[in-house]
Every structure is written in C-alpha cells, then in structure tokens.
Image (tube, helix red, strand yellow):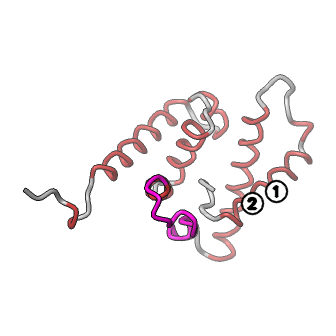
Amino acid sequence: MVLSRNRDVAEELVQSTCVRALERSGQYTPGTRIDRWLFSVLHSVWINELRAQRVRLGQGFVDCDELVAADQQQHDEQRQQYAKVMQRVSQLPEAQRNAVFLVYVEGFTYQEAADTLAVPIGTIMSRLAAARTTLASAATLRPAGQEKRL
C-alpha cells in the first residue's frame, strides 16, 4: 500500500513478487533474511511496473485521495489520525517513502534498507532525515480555521 497507494495495485504487486520470487528462488542465499530478499524483489517489480506505466500511459502514481478507504473516513479519532499520517507519507517523494517503509514499517536496519534499495547507507539516512523533517513540518501546520483564539 505504501508503494502503490492503491489496494488493487498493491495486491497485484504482491502476487507478481511471489511469482518472481518463485521463478528466481535459486538466487536466494540460504542464511539471509528472506523478508529482506523478498522486499528487494518487490522493489524491483515495482520499479519495472512504474517504468512500464510511464511508457504506456505517460503517468505515474494514483491520486492521494484514493488512499483513504471508506472505513478510514469514520469519525473514529485514531482512524482519522492514521489516514492523515498515511496521506502525508504518501505525499513524500518515492525515494523517501520507500526508506520510511523499510525502516519504520518493516523494521529494517539502515544497512538492510540500503542493501535492499541498492543505495549507500548515507543515502538512506539522508532520505529518512528529509522525510522526518517534511512530516514534522506538516504535522505542526494547522489549517487557518483552527488557530487558537484567546
């Protein structure tokens, strides 16, 4: 969901990842974390799909509004907060979003995330710092109508 921002696309991505992993199971090194290897496969499938979409359709991601499912629009405060956070995360640039997903959601170490995305560890650290700054500034901004009045 973090990568595609669409439930149907996310399900297809998982299926494609499983197929690719089975096809290339010989590339898995026993003793390594299988989740890390699977996320590498998933990321590769995702990048390939993005490139194909851009060639075919000339467009990238789906709109952020599609991220908010009907059940998240209930008046439950926790669900509303979750939806706001997910919208903010989904608005991050793809590279930052991927780093946030791997480190904060999946619990990868910085080095594991760097290996998975095939970038230096410093790049992961930089992307996470930028993402934290963006998310923190978005969280502190209040809509004009909600300013505290004395």
Residue 137, label in figure: none
The picture places residue 105, in percent across and down from the top left corner, at 58, 40
Mark 1, residue position: 15
23, above or below 67, in the image: above
Q: Is residue 75 magenta?
A: yes
The picture places residue 7, in percent across and down from the top left corner, at 67, 63
Q: Amino acid at mark 2?
A: Glu
Which span is picked out in magenta?
61-78
Q: Secondary structure at mark 1?
A: helix
Task: Tell me whether circle 1 and circle 2 mark residues in contact (CB < 8 Å).
Answer: yes
Mark 2, residue position: 11
Q: Residue at x 38, y 48 (%)?
A: 135
65, above or below 99, in the image: below
Q: Is residue 1 magenta?
A: no
The picture places residue 49, in percent across and down from the top left corner, at 71, 62
Task: Measure the C-alpha gap from mark 1 to mark 2.
Answer: 6 Å
Q: Amino acid at mark 1?
A: Gln
Please state which of residues 2 and 112 is positioned toward the viewer in this rendering: 2
Residue 46 appears in which quarter of the rendering?
bottom right
Q: Is residue 81 left or right of residue 10?
A: left
Residue 29 appears in which quarter of the rendering?
top right
Q: Residue at x 43, y 45 (%)?
A: 131
Label 1 CA crowd tier, 10 Å (few <14, some 14–19, many 20+): few
The picture places residue 24, in percent across and down from the top left corner, at 89, 44
50, above or below 57, in the image: above
* Farthest residue, direction left: 150
